[in-house]
């Protein structure tokens, strides 16, 4: 499965429960962005346990990472960016950063 296939499948699942009269792309974008931020918070909250000397759970972390990627994929699609395009941009940014570091 490619990331774009994943996103297409995720698009068929309603992540945002809004009354049809209240649904706009702008509201849905905001809802997904806040959902992504919320999932990032859940990841951070789970991992902060290590600061208290507790162990974090790999499966729980994997679940939260999956929740985050779902929100991210939906956000990409609704914004008109294919996830593979976003990953390609990120890859080019990483490669440019590596090239700059190699010149230092
Ligand atoms: Mg979650």
Image: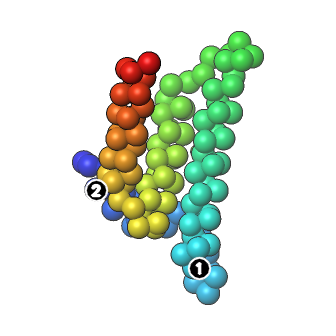
Q: Is residue 61 left or right of residue 91?
A: right
Front one among 35 and 83: 83
Residue at 60% across, 22% down: 56
Residue at 62% across, 65% down: 30
- Of the residues under marks 1 and 2, which one precedes in the sequence? 2
Residue at 69% across, 25% down: 48
Across and down, in percent, residue 95 comes to 35, 33
Across and down, in percent, residue 75 comes to 49, 60
Residue found at the very far bottom of the displayed protein: 21
Query: How many marks can you see?
Result: 2
Q: How is the image coloured?
A: rainbow
Visible residue check, residue 6:
no
Residue 29 position by quadrant: bottom right
Front one among 82 and 65: 82
Residue 25 position by quadrant: bottom right
Visible residue check, residue 21:
yes
User: Which residue is the site of mark 1?
Assistant: 23
Q: Which mark is residue 57?
A: none
* Crowd rating for badge 1 (residues with CA inside 10 Å; few <14, some 14–19, many 20+): few
Q: Is residue 33 left or right of residue 74?
A: right
**Cα distance between the residues tagged 1 and 2:** 25 Å
Front one among 90 and 10: 90
| Mark 2 Cβ and ligand 1 under 8 Å apart | no
Query: Which of the image's four quarters has the C terminus?
Result: top left
User: Which residue is the site of mark 2?
Assistant: 5
Residue found at the very far left of the displayed protein: 1
Q: Is residue 68 left or right of residue 84?
A: right
Q: Are marks 1 and 2 in contact (CB under 8 Å)?
A: no
Residue 10 position by quadrant: bottom left
SS label for mark 1: loop
Across and down, in percent, residue 18 comes to 61, 75
Residue found at the very far top of the displayed protein: 53
């Amino acid at each position: 499965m490619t990331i774009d296939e994943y996103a297409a499948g995720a698009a068929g699942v309603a992540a945002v429960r809004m009354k049809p009269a209240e649904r706009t792309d702008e509201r849905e974008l905001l809802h997904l962005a806040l959902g992504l931020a919320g999932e990032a918070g859940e990841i951070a909250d789970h991992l902060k346990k290590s600061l208290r000397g507790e162990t974090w759970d790999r499966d729980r972390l994997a679940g939260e990472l999956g929740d985050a990627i779902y929100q991210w994929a939906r956000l990409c699609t609704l914004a008109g960016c294919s996830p593979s395009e976003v990953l390609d941009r990120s890859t080019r940014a990483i490669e440019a950063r590596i090239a700059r570091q190699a010149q230092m």
